[in-house]
Each structure stands twice: as C-alpha cells, then as structure tokens.
Amino acid sequence: MERMSLTVNGETIETQINPGTTLQKFLHDTLGLTGTKEGCGEGLCGCCTVRVDGKAVKSCIILALQVNGKSVQTIEGLAKGETLDPVQEAFLDHGAFQCGYCTPGMIMTSRSFLDENPAPSEKEIRYALSGNLCRCTGYHKIVKAVLSVDPKKEIVAK
Ligand code: FES
Ligand code: FES
C-alpha cells in the first residue's frame, strides 16, 4: 500500500492505496462517487471522465497514485450547492441523455472544453466530444446542449 493525499471535489483526502488501483475504481468503489462510470475500461468510451487540475481525464486509464497531490473533480462536485453548472442545466433543458450512463463523462469533458473555448462552433464541439461515446442519443441533443451554454452565465452558489 502507498500513502496518497489529494483533493476530491474540494475535500482533502489522505489515504493508503494499492498502487495498481485505477483512479476510476478509487473514485467509484472506494469513495462511492458512482457518477464516475466504468464502460470500456480502455480509454475509448469516455464515460469515466473526470477533471484533474481542471483538465478532462479518462480515469480508467490512469492510476489513482498518479493524481497524488492533485485536485480531482467528479460530476458530484460540479454543482455549487443546489445550483447546477450551466452545462448540467443545458443537458437537462435539451434532454441530452437517455439512459444517462455516458452523461457524467460528457458533461465533464464539455465543461473542460468550454473553459478553454467558451464560444465553440458545432464542429469544434463534435471534435471535442469525439472521445465520449453515447449509445442512445445520436449525439445531436448533446451537441445542441453544449452549443447553448452561455459563456457569461456565472454560477452563483446558494
Ligand atoms: S471506461 Fe474509461 S474510457 Fe471507457
Ligand atoms: S444516454 Fe445512454 S449512453 Fe448516452
């Protein structure tokens, strides 16, 4: 076991961890943050996407130990209190999910992408989300949702 210290959704965590544990398993199984799904387990589907120091990362293909000392954000940490992130609101407004399995990863990827490119074109959105697979929606509503996010909309915590 190895000692590790990190921040998850703003909370500092000191723990011991098996060096072979992936970040997805650590978040989902150890911390109970079940929004971080496992799909392919090979870095192909994107449903395990979280943010590490603000960047979207596929958590099934990195070890938890690799985020030692870093700040991790999962879908559970995206809303501010009861106020949803504008990307979450947009997914709701556009019905951009069906089974919802891909949704946390889609939203975390979209959030990171929009932080870097607040007013993207449809083509740029489709490219940014090309590593996130959805079996249900046909992507159109997801792309429309991301396109609709107002970059000037600030989150105001309640
Ligand atoms: S489960 Fe991580 S990319 Fe598919
Ligand atoms: S909503 Fe079902 S996989 Fe995307």
Image (cartoon, rainbow, N blue to C red):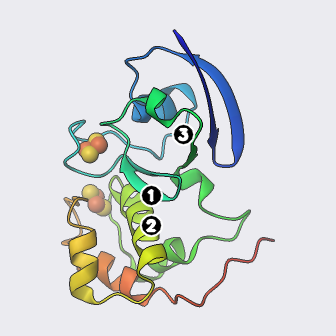
Tell how many labels.
3
Question: Which SS class for mark 2?
Answer: helix
Circle 3 is placed at which residue position? 33
Distance (Cα) linking label 2 and label 1: 6 Å
Q: Dividing the image into four equal quarters, which quarter contains ligand 2? A: bottom left
Residue appearing at x 66%, y 83% in the figure: 154
Query: Crowding at label 3, few (<14), some or many (≥20) Cα neighbours within 10 Å?
Result: some
Q: Is mark 3 within 8 Å of ligand 1?
A: no
Closer to the chain start, of discs 2 and 1, is 1
Q: Quadrant of residue 61?
A: top left
Q: Which numbered marker is on residue 112?
A: 2
Q: Residue 135, image x and y in percent?
A: 19, 59
Residue type pointed to by label 2:
Ser
Closer to the chain start, of discs 1 and 3, is 3
Query: Crowding at label 2, few (<14), some or many (≥20) Cα neighbours within 10 Å?
Result: some
Closer to the chain start, of discs 2 and 3, is 3
Q: Is mark 2 within 8 Å of ligand 1?
A: no
Q: Which numbered marker is on residue 81?
A: none
